Amino acid sequence: MECATPVGRGTQHHYQKQQSRALKIRELSLPLSPFHLQMAAFRLLVQHARQIVMVCNKGQPALRGQDMKQLAVLTKSDQSSSTGYSLIVDHSGIINAIGPDEEIEQTFSANEFTNVIDATDMCVLPGLVDGHTHPVWAGDRVHEFKMKLRGASYMEVHASGGGINFTVRCTREASEDDLYNSLQKRASVMMKNGTTLFEAKSGYGLDTDTEIKMLRVIKRGIDNFPIDISATYCGAHSVPENMTMKEATEDVITNQIPAIKKLMNQGSLEVDNIDVFCEKGVFDVPSTCKILKAGKEAGLAINFHGEELHPLQSAEMGAKLGARAISHLEMVSEEGIKAMADNETVAVLLPTTAYILKLSPPPARSMIDNGVAVALGTDFNPNAYCLSMPLVMHLACIILKMTMEEALAAATINAAASVGRSKRQGSLEIGKLGDMVIIDAAR
């Protein structure tokens, strides 16, 4: 999948039918020149598509249960006299119209477009959304793969000084510019794989200064990259080597969160979510609950790691707190699934992690059957180096036993819901951002 140059910023681009393209339509940070305003009423026309997979067509904030199998799709039949379907995006990056070519041409025949894409025999999908990533870090952990091949568990690597704390040491030493440059490269690969929005965590600092450094890097990405980012503060990703869990919890609550909140109020940082790695040997359920409450009081949405390696009933706790999303959930209980369904907490499943760590996969089928909105993420990090949502969708079908329709819903509207963006992203509907992937296939 090839990434096209993003449309916008006052530059005119010419598109021809070539390869599959991922298009990220952002709101303009710079106004169009008077020339463009005079010459073109709309920013983009995609025409003659064989199929447009809207995913939703009724403004649903997320899809649950059987609705994950019943996606909104416009398909040209072989018997139809229509030449296909069209989609129009305005100069703010908003979808203005979707429909048969003939209707769009009749309604908009007097208008001109800055960009026109001929999508004959192609399929148009919503831009993919990656619901869980750790994209800001330095160093690598290739040596740990050898340990795992010899049978070492995740927590055994962690206890030996590896894992998260190894990356913390490297990230603390790295400059902000080095971290920014690596994030830029990783975000570019995401776009080439069809991702147009991703959640990005801090969490390899574990102290106030480095966590803020990481969040500044993410803010620079928000301001400069042609891809959308939802920032997550994850200062409780691990217990620092010189602290106890109790001390680390107190540091996060009394030092890190207030410092981050101050910078958010000043406009220096833009942070949406708070995350904690709730796990045996890391942060227990009571400590996690205290940190999540403090983050919620600071205006951050709860979106945390839970039930990955041990059943701790953190899903029940998180749902009760009003968590927007909980990730991993390999060990979630039936009671936890019910609590998440009752409180409309999104489950962000990460099949790459189950695959790499040889874990029992999360019970996706049970979650879907019981009404939990299931989303997907790459869990990109030094331990799970994957930037491809199409690969994650494939693994979801094979490992998690999800259908293709469920995997697409999980990688679009439900992943957008996991970061509170589904009102504007995650489906191709009038009034939403025109983020899309055009694939050189009929369906």
Image (tube, grey):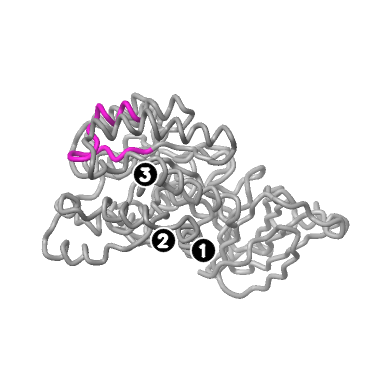
Above or below 125: residue 415: above
- Disc assigned to residue 346: none
Looking at the rendering, the stretch of residues picked out in magenta corresponds to 275-291
186 vs 315, left or right, is right
Q: Give the residue at x 37% y 38%.
A: 275
Residue type at numbered disc 2: Leu
Q: Residue furthest bottom?
A: 18
Q: Is residue 437 above or below residue 293?
A: below
Marks 1 and 3, Cα distance to the nearest angstrom?
23 Å
Could you tell me the amino acid type at mark 3?
Val
Amino acid identity at mark 1:
Ser
SS for dot 1: helix
Q: Is residue 72 visible?
A: no
Instruction: Tell me residue 214's x, y (percent).
Output: 44, 49
Question: x%, y% of residue 45?
Answer: 72, 59
Residue assigned mark 2: 387
First along the sequence among labels 3 and 2: 3
Q: Nearer the viewer, mark 1 or mark 3?
A: 1
Visible residue check, residue 128:
yes
Queried whether the magenta region covers residue 290, the answer comes back as yes
Frontmost residue, 323 versus 123: 323
Q: Is residue 430 left or right of residue 125?
A: right
Residue at the image position 36 percent from the left and 47 percent from the top? 205
Residue 365's quadrant in the figure?
top left
Q: How many marks?
A: 3
Please check the rendered image and state whether residue 379 is part of the magenta-colored stretch, yes or no: no
The tag earlier along the polypeptide, 2 or 1, is: 1
- The residue singled out by tag 1 in the image is 188
Q: CA distance from mark 3 to mark 2?
A: 16 Å
